[in-house]
Image (cartoon, helix red, strand yellow):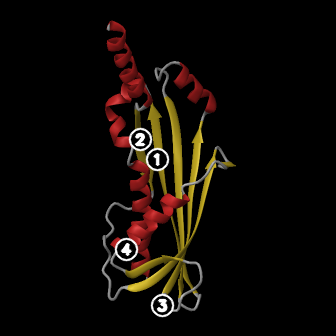
Amino acid sequence: MGFNKYSRLVLVACAGLLLSACSFRSGELPNNFAWPPASAAPKAVQFKLRAVETSNGELYIYGSDEATWRKDIRREFLASGLFSAVDEQTDRSPSAHALVEVVGRDDFTYSPVLSQLNQSTFFIVPDRSCHNYTLTMTFKDAGGKVLGTIEKREKVVYWSQIALLPFSPFTLTVRRKVRADLIRSTLAEARQLGYL
């Protein structure tokens, strides 16, 4: 009976250790852009996405965040009020007023040695990793003429250490929020520059 009581406590402690992390954002995104941007008449738009992920400079081959980027782009494009319909480009349909080519890039960097040391000491030794996000959007009219290109960057630094356990719940939504802010900021600037 006593073994079960202690085994649950150990299990909860181990789960807590796995989630003990904290994240900080730093980048070039402005804090004061208008969202949603003012819109005259919503247009139909198609987007073409290419998602790239690297880990310490090498192409990440175990799958990418492409599905998540696709979902975030569709959600934020519709939330902007600038578009009446948002579709991924397969064949140019005559109903699309614009085409947006999107490149979402996540360059992940970390120290393999520090990561192993962190895990082997049960998160006593701190570990640092970094996601460098780059979003590039090229805006084209219905005829395919390039109107302009906008590139935005944001960096998220993750720290993992046992003392950061109270901050762990706040790190789970950071990646999604960064992607949403990159898309929103890019659309707001594109509207301001007259690309949309």
Q: x%, y% of residue 8? A: 35, 19
Asked if the residue under mark 3 is in contact with the one under mark 4, i.e. CB atoms within 8 Å, the reply is no
Q: Which amino acid is tagged 3?
A: Ser
Q: Secondary structure at mark 3?
A: loop
Asked if the residue under mark 2 is in contact with the one under mark 4, i.e. CB atoms within 8 Å, the reply is no
Report the front residue among 144 and 38.
144
* Closer to the eye: label 4 or 2: 4
Q: Is residue 63 left or right of residue 31?
A: right
Q: Which residue is mark 4?
A: 78
Residue 92, by quadrant, is: bottom right
Q: x%, y% of residue 50? A: 60, 66
Asked if the residue under mark 2 is in contact with the one under mark 1, i.e. CB atoms within 8 Å, the reply is yes
Q: Which residue is mark 2?
A: 23
Q: Which amino acid is tagged 2?
A: Ser
N-term-proximal mark, 4 vs 2: 2
Q: Which amino acid is tagged 1?
A: Val
Q: Label 1, label 2: how many angstroms apart (C-alpha)?
A: 7 Å
Q: Residue at x 44, y 51 (%)?
A: 175
Q: Label 3, label 1: how many angstroms apart (C-alpha)?
A: 38 Å
Q: Which residue is mark 1?
A: 156
Q: Which residue is mark 3?
A: 95
N-term-proximal mark, 1 vs 2: 2
